[in-house]
Image (tube, rainbow, N blue to C red):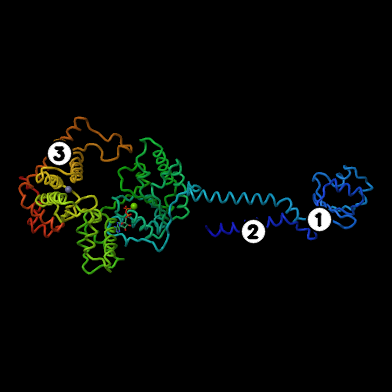
Amino acid sequence: MKPLSKNIIVALLVVLALGVVFSTYDLGGSKAKPTDIGISDLVSKVEAGEVKSIDVEGNSLDIKNQKDEEFLANKESAQSLNEILTGYGVTAEQLKAVNITVKEPSALSSLVSNLLPTLLFVLIFGAVLYFFLRQMQGANNKAMTFGQANAKESTNKKNRVTFAEVAGATEAKQELGEIVEFLKTPKKFADLGAKIPKGVLLMGPPGTGKTLMARAVSGEANVPFFHISGSEFVEMFVGVGASRVRDLFARAKKAAPCIVFIDEIDAVGRQRGSGTGGGHDEREQTLNQILVEMDGFEPNLGVIVMAATNRPDVLDSALLRPGRFDRRVTLDRPDLKEREAILKIHAASKPLAADVDLKRIAERTPGMAGADLMNIMNEAAILAARADKKETSQTELLEAIEKVMLGPERKSHILGEEERLVTAYHEAGHAVVGHLLPYCDDVHKVSIIARGRAAGYTMSIPDEDRKMHSRNEFYDDLAMTLGGYVAEQEIFGDFTTGASNDLQKATAMARELVTQFGMSELLGPRTYGNDDDHAYFGRGEARDYSEKIAEQIDSEMNRVLADALQKAREIVRKHRVQLDKIVGELLTKETIEKEAFESLLGPSIKRPKVTVQAVNA
Ligand code: ADP
Ligand code: MG
Ligand code: ZN
């Protein structure tokens, strides 16, 4: 409980106690307690001439008899004492004998008699209400602050992130450096009549540092940073999102210059105007409100809205219009140099052994994003700590790569004799096919130690970063993917469920090859259908081809897969000796590294270099 509410409670208790004291003891009467009598008793006493004086104070009568004994009585408030007594038949003579003094009721006593009960009631009621409300808030958190944006504002100097902490992303930094300038010296631009951009959209795959980059921009410019995630707008109750947007922008305008960062904006910013369901309406309203707010504020106010998404393709085009998120910054997966730099940043706080070679780690992690690399450094440190080491060494780093890529090793998952043998042939199948096909990546490791969900694994890593993939690569990769399946069939004449993951992968690859990349001669250079979930978000039908084409796609996929299977089968049959060698090694050592593997099979066959054929003029 907060100290303030504690004080309130103490104050309430004191007032209550006082109230009890006031109401039970009459503050005026300090002498022996007088007797209470009724009006009729009083009347008979007056008639008998016993009464010496009556003090009237409000409605209470303080009566003294000839012997100076005291009595108390109460009269009705509407009538005066005279009227009452006369009404009871007391004569004027008799009245005269009584010395009646009317006192103005004292402030204190009237308070005590009149106000206190009401006051007490109000206080008790208030206290009860207060506790109830608190309880409700506790149980149903935020029930009272629904419409308010729960954007986290951070101006904390200690957690300030700067561009130095974002490795690589040179172009993005350049582009955003401009934004930093805008925020730092808005006047310089305003004087020249330049309009400061309102919105910046950060795009890139998950974990490439979009959130980090947005923070770094606010850190560099040293301005407040309001951070909210797109999904936080979308609540159970319609209209909440829009009111949160309003609230967020109101706060931001007060804090300008500042950055409003809407993370994962695709949660609200998807293409509008299709689909049904409440959630969708809510999203639409929220999105509209964002657009309204962005249009509403003065361009040179100094509020810059940054947003991040890994799905720029599904965003509503209204968001991308000039005057809104018209600046777009792409963050890509890091290349070799950048990966090394990212690893260095995350290694800075960790003691590393002398044998650590971050370049080699970077070489082993193509395609990984910054978040994965951070994860690897962290996992390695955990592994080192578990082994009671004082420093992280290369072994832990290499182990961490595999852990991040394939899941943790499951040493306790002991395979039976037979399963071990099947797994060994399965993995050897992948490895041998991969090794002997020129367009496959080099095999770096083969293992029959279970990891994650796989019973064993073959790890192949490209020797350079590659953004494009050729059809030859796809065909060879498909054959390698089916290598395990083929080996099982060739050796044991039977299949196991262990290959099902490979088959899924191969099928997906074949579909892409045929429908997305135009790599099938039969179907030609066009795409078929939209990939993944666009259909649900307003791009109309997912399928944009006829039933006849659907059949052709199926048969093309089957052909591609059958070719790959055939290719793999030939290799497995032809190189049975090598296959058996690998299996023997796997059964004794469980894991074969690249060097040992190549000494068993010979060096890998390199892909032919791409050449330009001379044109005869
Ligand atoms: P995104 O928002 O793009 O999904 P994040 O910004 O959340 O990715 O990145 C997650 C973490 O990964 C960051 O906190 C940071 O530690 C690390 N990271 C990602 N990219 C980089 C980078 N270029 N340099 C340094 N660290 C990075
Ligand atoms: Mg993020
Ligand atoms: Zn497999």
Q: Taking the image as drawn, is residue 327 in sight?
A: yes
Disc 1 crowd rating (10 Å Cα; few below 14, some 14-19, many 20+) is some
Q: What percent of the width, then of the height, locates residue 110? A: 75, 53
Question: Which callout, 1 or 3, points at the residue further toward the start of the chain?
Answer: 1
**Above or below 296: residue 378:** below
Q: Tell me the kind of residue under disc 1.
A: Pro
Q: What percent of the width, then of the height, locates residue 346? A: 29, 62
Label drawn at residue 520: 3
232 or 322: nearer the viewer: 232
Mark 1 and mark 3: Cα distance apart in space: 113 Å
Mark 1 vs mark 3: in front: 1
Mark 2 vs mark 3: in front: 2
Residue depicted at 49% across the width and 51% down the height: 138
Disc 2 crowd rating (10 Å Cα; few below 14, some 14-19, many 20+) is few
Which residue is the site of mark 1? Answer: 34
- Locate residue 289 relative to residue 488 in the image: left or right: right
Mark 2 C-beta closer than 8 Å to ligand 1:
no
Mark 1 vs mark 2: in front: 1
Verify CB contact (< 8 Å) between mark 1 and mark 3.
no
39 or 95: nearer the viewer: 39
Residue depicted at 38% across the width and 60% down the height: 219
The outermost residue toward the front is 417
Q: Tell me the kind of residue under disc 3.
A: Ser
Quarter of the figure with residue 19 = bottom right
- Locate residue 533 relative to residue 519 in the image: left or right: right
Question: Which callout, 2 or 3, points at the residue further toward the start of the chain?
Answer: 2
Q: Tell me the kind of residue under disc 2.
A: Val
Q: What percent of the width, then of the height, locates residue 291? A: 41, 44
